[in-house]
Image (cartoon, rainbow, N blue to C red):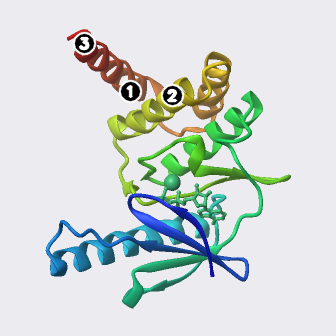
Amino acid sequence: MKTLAVGSEAVIYEKDSIIIKRRAKKKYRIKEIDEKLRKSRSKAEFNIMNFLYRNGLNVPKPLKYVDRKKEIRMERIDGTRLAEDFSSYDAKNIGTAVAEMHNLGIIHGDLTTANMIKTDKKLYIIDFGLSFHSLKDEDFASDIFLFKNALKSKHNDLYKEAYSCFLNAYKSKIRKEFKGIDTHLKDIEERRRYNESY
Ligand SMILES: Nc1ncnc2c1ncn2[C@@H]1O[C@H](COP(=O)(O)OP(=O)(O)O)[C@@H](O)[C@H]1O
Ligand SMILES: [Mg+2]
């Protein structure tokens, strides 16, 4: 088993073209509570991946949830992380994928280019560790806001063009009236600016 990544929440292993994502123990939590939290969050992540996969979204195929180990097993996507190789063309594909995910009522919660992988054919969204179900405009807006900020901080040279490609694709796919989402987006940005000026 090869260790691929060690994050604050999970450790990622690779074994025979399979990815194993195991929730890390948190020493500061009471043991019993930690067990329960890791189990419920890992299970929730697996269920969301399953739901999206069955509905045709490009996510790694979930293979198994192992309760005892609080781990998810999934297909390994053999491609390039967008954090390492990103263009405005990718931004358009992300806009489409995020709108399709929102149409299914799933908010990602951590939309950055570190959580996206592209292959020759497809763009995959990964890491549903912070995802939840919602059809609220304000939750859609918070996903968009997070992604916009990720672009600004990680891909500043492309930021303006990429964001506009992302948003145009998103708008053309989202089945809700965009105006309602946009109102919340402006609201979040307003609040952010207000807080930053102090
Ligand atoms: N299915 C997968 N295929 C290929 N690489 C993956 C896969 N899942 C995770 N990874 C790699 O492991 C890293 C961390 O996984 P992720 O699910 O984002 O965990 P974390 O919650 O720690 O961010 C990703 O950025 C990616 O490089
Ligand atoms: Mg991640």
> Which marked residue is nearer to the observer: mark 1 or mark 3?
3
Left or right: 175 in relation to 157: left
Residue 180 disc label: 1
Q: Is mark 2 within 8 Å of ligand 2?
A: no
Is 185 situated above or below 66?
Answer: above
Q: Which residue is mark 2?
A: 148
Q: Residue furthest top?
A: 197
Residue at left offset 58%, top offset 46% = 114
Earlier along the polypeptide chain: callout 1 or callout 3? Answer: 1
**Distance Cα–Cα, label 1 vs label 2:** 18 Å
Ligand 1 positioned in quadrant: bottom right
Q: Earlier in the sequence, mark 2 or mark 3?
A: 2
Quarter of the image where one finds residue 60: bottom right
Question: Residue 143's image quarter?
Answer: top left
Label 1 neighbour load within 10 Å: few <14, some 14-19, many 20+: some
Location of residue 151 by image quarter: top right
Q: Circle 1 sits in a helix, a strand or a loop, which is it?
A: helix
Query: Along the line of sight, which residue is nearer the eye, 80 or 11?
Result: 11
Q: Is residue 182 above or below residue 73?
A: above
- Looking at the rendered structure, the secondary structure element under dot 2 is helix
Q: Residues within 10 Å of mark 2 (few under 14, many from 20)?
A: many
- The disc placed on residue 194 is 3
The span from disc 1 to disc 3 (Cα, nearest Å) is 21 Å
Quadrant placement of the N terminus = bottom right
Residue 169 placement (x, y as % from top left): 65, 32
Of residues 65 and 5, the one nearer the viewer is: 5
State the CA–CA distance, disc 2 to disc 3.
18 Å
Q: Earlier in the sequence, mark 1 or mark 2?
A: 2
Q: Amino acid at mark 1?
A: Gly
- Which quadrant of the rendered structure holds the C terminus? top left
Which residue occupies the extreme bottom position in the image? 68
**Vertical placement of residue 121 versus 86, above or below:** below
